[in-house]
Image (cartoon, helix red, strand yellow):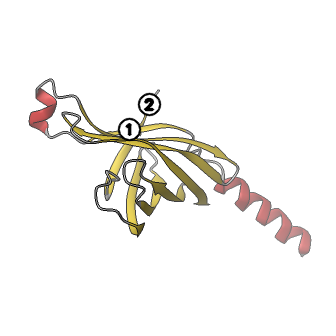
């Protein structure tokens, strides 16, 4: 019986780590009108590295026309299921800290949703909800 439980735990652990969050993930936050014009910035991105169940990385964002920038915020997280993770994101712009969930869909996009603001200074650019695409 113990042997069977050990094997099942090993399989579950391997499945939890099967989908890697490693890579650069980006979302275009510009409106359709801004996309049709040469408007710079208007993005948010995660640059993540996954080692086993731990995730580390950075967050950056810029509003359309580059009016506000957040470059180099820290990201820490843990994989919670085969395609899901909990991330803590600290804004480099104002030191705000947000916690949220990230999940990778079968099509390979990363969905982010902020659950709570642990420390909010007011002017962070961490999206409440967004769909990120992995860059090649």
Instruction: Please give the residue where the numbered disc 1 appears in the rendered image.
Output: 26
Label drawn at residue 5: none
The numbered mark, 2 or 1, whose residue comes first in the sequence reads 1
- For the point 54% across and 58% down, the residue is 85
Q: Is residue 82 in view from this perspective? A: no
Q: How many marks?
A: 2
Q: Residue 123's quadrant in the figure?
A: bottom left
- Quadrant containing the N terminus is bottom right
As helix, strand or loop, the secondary structure at mark 1 comes to: strand
**In percent of the image, x 42 and y 62: which residue is there?**
98
Q: Nearer the viewer, residue 87 or 124?
A: 124
List x then y, in percent, for residue 104: 47, 50
Q: Is residue 92 left or right of residue 74?
A: left
Residue drawn at 46 percent across, 55 percent down: 90
Crowd band around label 1 with a 10 angstrom C-alpha radius: few (<14), some (14–19), many (20+): many
Residue at numbered disc 2: 135
The residue located at (38%, 62%) in the rendering is 114
Packing grade of label 2 (10 A; few <14, some 14-19, many >=20) is few
Pinpoint residue 95: horizontal percent, then vertical percent.
Answer: 42, 56
Could you tell me if the residues under marks 2 and 1 are in contact, i.e. CB atoms within 8 Å?
Answer: yes
Above or below: residue 130 compared with residue 80: above
Residue 102 can be seen in this image: yes
CA gap between label 2 and label 1 equals 7 Å
Residue nearest the observer in this picture, 24 or 56? 56
């Amino acid at each position: 019986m113990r042997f069977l439980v050990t094997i099942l735990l090993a399989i579950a652990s391997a499945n939890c780590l099967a989908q890697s969050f490693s890579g650069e993930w980006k979302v275009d936050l510009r409106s359709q009108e801004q996309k049709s014009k040469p408007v710079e910035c208007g993005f948010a991105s995660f640059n993540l590295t996954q080692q086993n169940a731990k995730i580390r990385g950075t967050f950056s964002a810029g509003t359309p026309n580059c009016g506000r920038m957040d470059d180099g915020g820290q990201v820490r997280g843990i994989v919670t299921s085969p395609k899901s993770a909990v991330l803590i994101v600290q804004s480099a712009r104002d030191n705000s800290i947000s916690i949220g969930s990230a999940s990778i869909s079968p099509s390979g996009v990363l969905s982010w949703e902020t659950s709570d603001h642990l420390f909010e200074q007011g002017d962070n650019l961490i999206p409440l909800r967004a769909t990120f695409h992995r860059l090649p």
